Structures are given as C-alpha cells and as structure tokens.
Image (tube, rainbow, N blue to C red):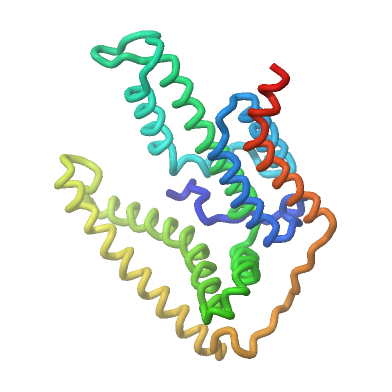
Amino acid sequence: MGKSMLGRSIPGDSALHLLDARIKFLAAIILMVAILSIQDPIIMAVFLIWTMMLMVLSKIRITTILRSVRPLVFIILFAVILHLVTVKGHILFHIGPIAISKEGLYTGAMTAMRLILMVINTSLLLTLTTMPLAIADALESLLSPLRYLRFPVHEFAMMMSIALRFVPILMDESAKIMKAQSSRGADYDTGGPIRRARGLVSILVPLFISSFRRADDLAIAMDARCYQGEKGRTRLYTAKLYPKDIVFLVLVVFLLAFAFVGPKVLGGFF
C-alpha cells in the first residue's frame, strides 16, 4: 500500500506540471474516450508513442509512473483471460479443454493495452503532475455553468479535493496499523477466507476510528478558519490559459479524431 501512487502527486517544473489544470482535466477525459475506442494496432502504436512522450515530458521516473498501473493488474489480467476464453476464431493451441484462438489473443492484448494506456495517461495528467487543490479548482471551474441549475459546484469540488488528499493518508495509516497489529501477534493473512475476514477486523476497526478522528479534526480546523462555503471566498492564484495550453488541447482533440477516422484513412492507403 505504501508503494501505491493512487492519489499522490509529485511536485515538479516540467512542461506537463506547468499546464493549466483545466486543460489537463479535459485532455484526460478526451484521451480516455479516444483510447477506449481504438481498434487498429497502428493507431494503438501512435497512442503508445504519445504516452511515451508524456512520460518524458513529465520528468518522472518510469518506475514511479508504472506503479500507478499496479492497482489494476488483476482487472487487466481478468480482461485478457476472459477474451482468451470467450472469443472464437482460428485455433492456435489448446490448454486442456480451453481453446486459445488468434482472435482471442489479439482482442485480449488490445484490451490490456487500452487499460494500461488509459491509466498511465490519466495518472500523468491528473494525480501525478497536478496538485489536489489544482484539480479541485479546475473541476469547480469546468462545472461552474451548473450553478444556474442550483448545483453546489464549490462544495462538490471541495469534497473531491478532500477525498483525493485523504486517499494516500489513509493508505499510509493502514500500512502502519498492519505493522502494529503484526507486532502484537495479530493473524490476518493466513488461513481460509473466513479466518482472514475475521482477522481484518483488527485492521478495519482502528482504521475507521482513525478516519473519523481525522474527519472531525478537519471539520474543527475548517470551522476555526471561518469556512462558510463559496460565499465571500477569493483565490490566491487565478488560473490563466496560455498558448501552450491551447496547443496541447488541440493535439489531444486531433488524437481523438485520429482514433475514430484513422482506420478509414489507413484503409485507403493499404
């Protein structure tokens, strides 16, 4: 848990760090749609090159970036195995009663690449290179038209910001509790499923108590600073768009168009 990058941001001065948070938020959504719609391996290769360029621009170690994929390894493996088993076609070989087809291998590999690229791109644009407060401000700015529908935009953005901040804190806290309980002889990782579930009570109870205590301390701190919601609040830094932000968004929109139109264009050449 302590090695997970979920909810953690890495400060820096790279080109990716300096992009406007609103642009990165929109780019992450557009890239998710584009990557999930890829059907051609050549287009997948283009997006792979794009992802590698983002990794270089971020100036973050590759091992750190790849750690963001770790929480989804089980889902990726499950998706690949599901395609291998269910997709019919030209049989390559058999594993017992299961027939592995060429089409199943292809769709499984494409699905795995889609999930990996989607996680890496969203992690680079949001959690790794953008501070939680910047994400909350960007979300509030993008959702500001909903104020006319009486939607509590500021409160929603504040809630998201607090949740993002608490994810790494709670993960570190759970790791400390697990070590403390292990030193006291607690047994929560051996035996059958029922025994493990009972053993996890010794971890979950103190974790919930610690979470409620932190939430109470946060509420007292916000009340002591006279926090009353959006009314009367100003910002220390005002977000401003620069030409580099517009250029980056245009590139992302071009990639989205290429993901949909690319197969037809490539089909005309080959």
Question: In terms of image quadrants, where is residue 211?
Answer: bottom left
Q: Nearer the viewer, residue 44 or 134?
A: 44
Residue 201 drawn above or below residue 120:
below
* Residue 255 falls left or right of residue 148: right
Residue at figure coordinates x 62%, y 45% from the top left = 31
* Residue 228 falls left or right of residue 195: right
Quadrant location of the C terminus in the rendered image: top right
Coordinates of residue 195 in the picture (x, y in percent)? 15, 47
Residue 41 drawn above or below residue 74:
above
Residue 203 can be seen in this image = yes
Residue 126 drawn above or below residue 160:
above
* Residue 247 falls left or right of residue 252: right
Figure disc tally: 0
* Residue 65 falls left or right of residue 186: right
Question: In terms of image quadrants, where is residue 203?
Answer: bottom left
Q: Nearer the viewer, residue 212 or 121?
A: 121
Coordinates of residue 50 in the picture (x, y in percent)? 69, 36
Coordinates of residue 56 in the picture (x, y in percent)? 72, 39
Residue 64 can be seen in this image = no
Residue at figure coordinates x 48%, y 66% from the top left = 163
Question: In terms of image quadrants, where is residue 72?
Answer: top left
Coordinates of residue 177 in the picture (x, y in percent)? 34, 58
Residue at figure coordinates x 64%, y 86% from the top left = 233
